[in-house]
Image (cartoon, rainbow, N blue to C red):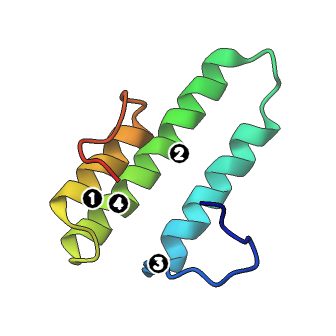
Amino acid sequence: MTTDPTEAVDRPTFTVSAAALDVAEQLRAIVAALPADNAHDRHLAARLIDAAELKKLADLRDAGVLTEEEFADRKAILLGHDKPTSEP
């Protein structure tokens, strides 16, 4: 089945604090500014971004927006595990 990209799609929505989004954007800017040959610093910065994203996911879970299973799935994807614990 092909989906029309202009077709409206129901997607879950949630709220993330402006402060959390600001921190994530600042970290992304830091990573983008690092020299390409500085792989170690780029790796560390990427891990900081992952930590910020994981914190946002945990906050959503704690607020009841994500179930424990949804949190675990997104965490697995974020941390680069093979695949989520549940099937789509």
Q: For the residue carrying disc 1, how many other residues have a C-alpha within 10 Å: few (<14), some (14-19), or many (20+)?
A: some
Q: CA distance from mark 2 to mark 4?
A: 12 Å
The disc placed on residue 57 is 4
Q: CA distance from mark 3 to mark 1?
A: 19 Å
Identify the mark nearer the N-term, 3 or 4.
Answer: 3
| In this picture, residue 22 sits left or right of residue 66 | right
Please identify the quarter of the rendering in which residue 25 is found.
bottom right
Q: Secondary structure at mark 4?
A: helix
Q: Is residue 53 above or below residue 40?
A: below
The N terminus appears in which quarter of the rendering? bottom right
Q: Amino acid at mark 4?
A: Leu
Instruction: From the image, tell me which residue sits under label 2.
Output: 49
Identify the mark nearer the N-term, 1 or 4.
Answer: 4
The one nearer the camera, 73 or 22, is: 73
Q: Amino acid at mark 1?
A: Glu
Identify the mark nearer the N-term, 3 or 1.
Answer: 3
The C terminus appears in which quarter of the rendering? bottom left
Please identify the quarter of the rendering in which residue 51 is found.
top left
Mark 3 against mark 4, which lies toward the viewer?
A: 4
Percent of width and height locating residue 15: 44, 81
Percent of width and height locating residue 48: 49, 41
Identify the mark nearer the N-term, 1 or 2.
Answer: 2
Q: Residue furthest front?
A: 1
| Cβ–Cβ under 8 Å for marks 1 and 4 | no
Q: For the residue carrying disc 2, how many other residues have a C-alpha within 10 Å: few (<14), some (14-19), or many (20+)?
A: some
Instruction: From the image, tell me which residue sits under label 3.
Output: 17
Q: Secondary structure at mark 1?
A: helix
Mark 1 against mark 4, which lies toward the viewer?
A: 1
Percent of width and height locating residue 16: 46, 76
